[in-house]
Amino acid sequence: MGDRLKGKVAAITGGGRGIGRSHALLFAAEGAKVVVNDLGGAADGTGAAKGPADEVVDEIKKMGGEAVANYDNVATHEGGENIIKTAIDNFGRLDILVNNAGVLRDRMVFNMTEEEWDTVQKIHLYGHFYCTRPACVVMRQQRGGRIVNTSSSSGLGNRGQANYAAAKEGIVGFTRTVARDMGRYGVTCNAIRPTAATRMTVSPEMEAARKKREEVGLPAPAYDLTRLTPEAIAPLVVFLCTDEAANINGCTFAVRAGEIHLMTDPVVEKSIHKDGRWTVGELCEVVPRSLAAGLVNPSPPEPPKE
């Protein structure tokens, strides 16, 4: 057991499995008291079970740490409130919130149902808000706290994940703004884009997608996902919640295995300017040889399948 987070209280959503479980165990190992939230549903968000959260709590207690389970659904206002209330009721305060809970409902955008879209938005994007809002009320009063949100490299664009990508990139914008809202109160808010082997990323569906990529000649990933353990993600998240990270706010980090990357915010890459408004004709002439010069279509047209 360490003591970098001794006396701190952390609430971790989706803490019963995968990356969230690794977070919970390492936070406890560094001395934090932990609220392990997990609805216990399937990877697509269906169902519920107390077992995942309870098992992690038992592991923490066997380590000599303190933890309590919470089974609320982050996709509801009441669920988010109850997660934060669980920390206050059991430990008297809340210093750290790690928004980690998530699901997948992958589908090409032209086949995606409203339910598949809504479920992913509610659990990822709404879930971050529903937990962060009550946490910020507490942290503002305490004048201190740490929030770590979970985005994804899929937010940069990933075939068949329009719902997931939209939610995950929304979380980045949410993170930047919460950082600005709460920084004056001594609260930091950062985001990670983790890559690790979990039930969401290593599954029969994902394996089928990988094989399909091979069949159509698309390049394979540059790394073997099965070798990227969830345990490699947690140290960065714990670090962002230490005193040493007090000046890191509004940032996004990509992390996988031993690699950690600080991501830049969007910046202006090229510009064109004229006095007055551009006409369509002018843009047709100027843009291809200026703004669009060198651009590569990430998904060029393919010949119809016979």
Image: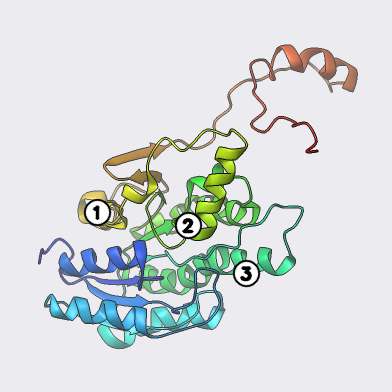
Compared to residue 98, the image places residue 246 above or below, namely above
Task: In this rendered view, identify the residue nearer to me: 282 or 51.
Answer: 51
Judged from the image, the secondary structure of the residue bearing numbered disc 1 is helix
Q: Label 2 vs label 1: CA separation?
A: 23 Å
Classify 217 as above or below 86: above
Residue 68: x and y, percent?
28, 83
In the image, is 273 to the left or to the right of 61? right
Q: Which secondary structure, mark 2?
A: helix
Q: Which mark is residue 119?
A: 3
Q: Nearer the viewer, residue 284 or 115?
A: 115
Q: Residues within 10 Å of mark 1 (few under 14, many from 20)?
A: few
Residue type marked 1: Pro
Q: Dividing the image into 4 quarters, which one contains the N terminus?
A: bottom left
Q: Is residue 130 left or right of residue 3?
A: right
Disc 2 marks which residue?
178
Question: Which residue is denoted by mark 1 in the rendering?
Answer: 235
Q: Residue at x 35, y 61 (%)?
A: 19
Q: Earlier in the sequence, mark 2 or mark 3?
A: 3
Label 3 vs 1, first from the N-terminus: 3
Task: Identify which residue is drawn at 65% across, 52% down.
Answer: 162
- Check if mark 2's residue and mark 1's residue have beta carbons within 8 Å: no
